[in-house]
Amino acid sequence: MDLLETLQANRSGNLLVVTGAGVSLASGIPTFRGTDPGAVWANDVLAKGTKAFFERDPKASWLWYLERFGKVLGAQPNAAHHALVTLEQVWEGDFLLVTQNIDGLHRKAGSNCLVEVHGSAQKVRCSRRGCINGEPKGSISIYDPHRFVAAYGEPDYLRALKTEGTLPRCERCNKILRPHILWFDEYYSAHEDYQIERVKSAANNANVILFVGTSFSVGVTEDLVDRAGLLGTPAFAVDPGSVKLPQWIQHVPAQAEVLLPDLVASLTKP
Ligand SMILES: [Zn+2]
């Protein structure tokens, strides 16, 4: 069965959708791990996208982060994000959308049953372990980084950081805040907001798994691919390129922002 037929046949079952950087390309967000010149994290990521770097030099870490993510914060959802909102609304069974992207575009588009498994560029938390605003848990530990801007009355927070060295601080304990994103030297268990157990459980119970624009190069996708293989769950990967996939995952060669709106339209046809 192809993707559409499989979705139609499992309409009242559990659907798990997993998205990666490919979903946000049409929103002008460069890939974070690719080898193209626009790849945001390509060169210094392993050294600077780490908790170790933040702890050694929080100001340099914040500068590095803000210089790269200013673009992300201004981006808008595209047709792929909007189609996934509709899919969630019309799906009759359980639906969960898990994204590796930290751009917040699924949330901006209006997805509700959503796990941002690598965190979000729009959020910060206290860097002190055990703080009520910090890790490993506590739903109130998520902040709006615009408060960082507001706190210093400076629209250009990069400039404020550069000239005054002002870093955002926890209102509870005054320790420096950190971006709420999963760094490369951290585990998914670092914060409960990454909801890794919910993701695994959704994979175990899924009737269909749909991967969209994922590179299959990070821990969580590897784990989900393995689960699909072990459980024999029908699984599809929407990607315009030639991705290397295990034989139990069916490749759907298409761009997400083209295929998903068509797919959802076919599903909702009376
Ligand atoms: Zn704190």
Image (tube, rainbow, N blue to C red):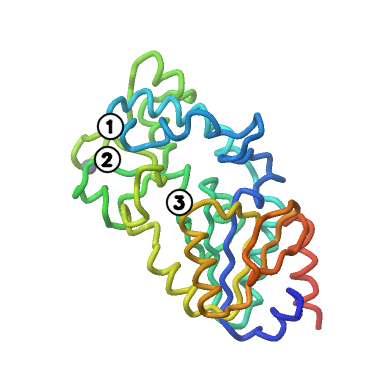
Residue lying furthest front: 247
Task: Classify mark 1: residues with Cα within 10 Å, few (<14), some (14-19) or many (20+).
Answer: few
In the image, residue 21 lies at what x, y percent?
Answer: 61, 48
Residue 118, labelled with which disc? 3
In the image, residue 17 lies at what x, y percent?
Answer: 59, 66
Which residue type does callout 3 highlight?
His
Q: Earlier in the sequence, mark 2 or mark 1?
A: 1
Image quarter where the N terminus lies is bottom right
Residue 100, labelled with which disc? none
Tell me the element at label 3. loop
Image quarter where the C terminus lies is bottom right
Q: Earlier in the sequence, mark 3 or mark 2?
A: 3
Report which residue position mark 2 lands on: 127
Which residue type does callout 1 highlight?
Glu
Q: Is mark 2 within 8 Å of ligand 1?
A: yes
- Determine the CA span between mark 3 and mark 2: 16 Å
In the image, residue 240 lies at what x, y percent?
Answer: 75, 53
Residue at image position (66%, 34%) is: 36
